[in-house]
């Protein structure tokens, strides 16, 4: 038979383990779809780097693209209109074609004259399981993905962002 002190220690350990398990299950899960905290990315662009999880406090529009995609060209035009009206929203475009050279990427960025952060990262496309481009995500101030879709028009993007401002 267990002594009272051993029994008490056992009970305390069981309660502590249960509390730890409950606390762990309540922590937001990271993911790549709506309702999850956005999976973190560290992106390197021509003019520096960006860590996605450090962009809290503001809304982030994350767009996955390629240089050769006609729909992506249209999406970039929609993002340019959006950026002109919503300068305080963080826009991040990620070129994900693994065949594009660093020189090709740099040339593309310079010809497009982006007003927002642009990076090249095929790995980010894999991490987010991108199966079609353009893919657009809207991440709220707390880091939760509130929208994931393909080509997203200016007015649609505006409505989504206004909902979470």
Image: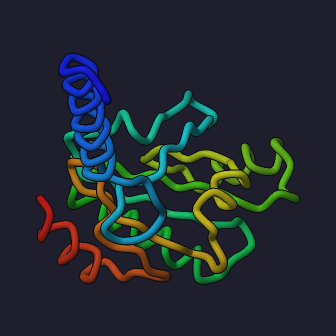
In terms of depth relative to the viewer, which is nearer, 159 or 78? 159
The picture places residue 121, in percent across and down from the top left corner, at: 69, 49
For residue 156, what is the image quadrant?
bottom left
The picture places residue 51, in percent across and down from the top left corner, at: 47, 35
Toward the front, the furthest residue is 1
| Residue 112 visible in the picture | yes
7 left or right of 49 in image: left
| Residue 87 visible in the picture | no
Q: Quadrant of the C terminus?
A: bottom left
- The residue located at (63%, 71%) in the rendering is 130
144 left or right of 109 in image: left
- The residue located at (43%, 47%) in the rendering is 115
Q: Quadrant of the N terminus?
A: top left
Q: As displayed, is residue 101 above or below residue 4?
A: below
For residue 158, what is the image quadrant?
bottom left
Q: As displayed, is residue 9 above or below residue 68?
A: above
In terms of depth relative to the viewer, which is nearer, 17 or 45? 17
- The residue located at (46%, 59%) in the rendering is 31
- The residue located at (70%, 59%) in the rendering is 96
């Amino acid at each position: 038979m267990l002594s009272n002190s051993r029994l008490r220690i056992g009970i305390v350990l069981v309660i502590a383990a249960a509390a730890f398990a409950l606390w762990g299950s309540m922590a937001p899960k990271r993911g790549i779809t709506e309702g999850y905290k956005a999976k973190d990315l560290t992106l390197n662009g021509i003019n520096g780097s960006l860590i996605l999880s450090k962009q809290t406090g503001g809304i982030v529009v994350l767009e996955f693209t390629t240089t050769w995609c006609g729909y992506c060209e249209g999406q970039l035009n929609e993002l340019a209109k959006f950026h002109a009206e919503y300068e305080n929203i963080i826009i991040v475009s990620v070129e994900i074609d693994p065949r594009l050279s660093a020189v090709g990427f740099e040339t593309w960025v310079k010809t497009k004259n982006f007003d927002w952060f642009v990076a090249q990262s095929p790995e980010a496309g894999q991490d987010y399981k991108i199966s079609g481009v353009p893919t657009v995500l809207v991440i709220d101030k707390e880091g939760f993905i509130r929208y994931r879709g393909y080509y997203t028009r200016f007015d649609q993007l505006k409505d989504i962002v206004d909902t979470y401002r």
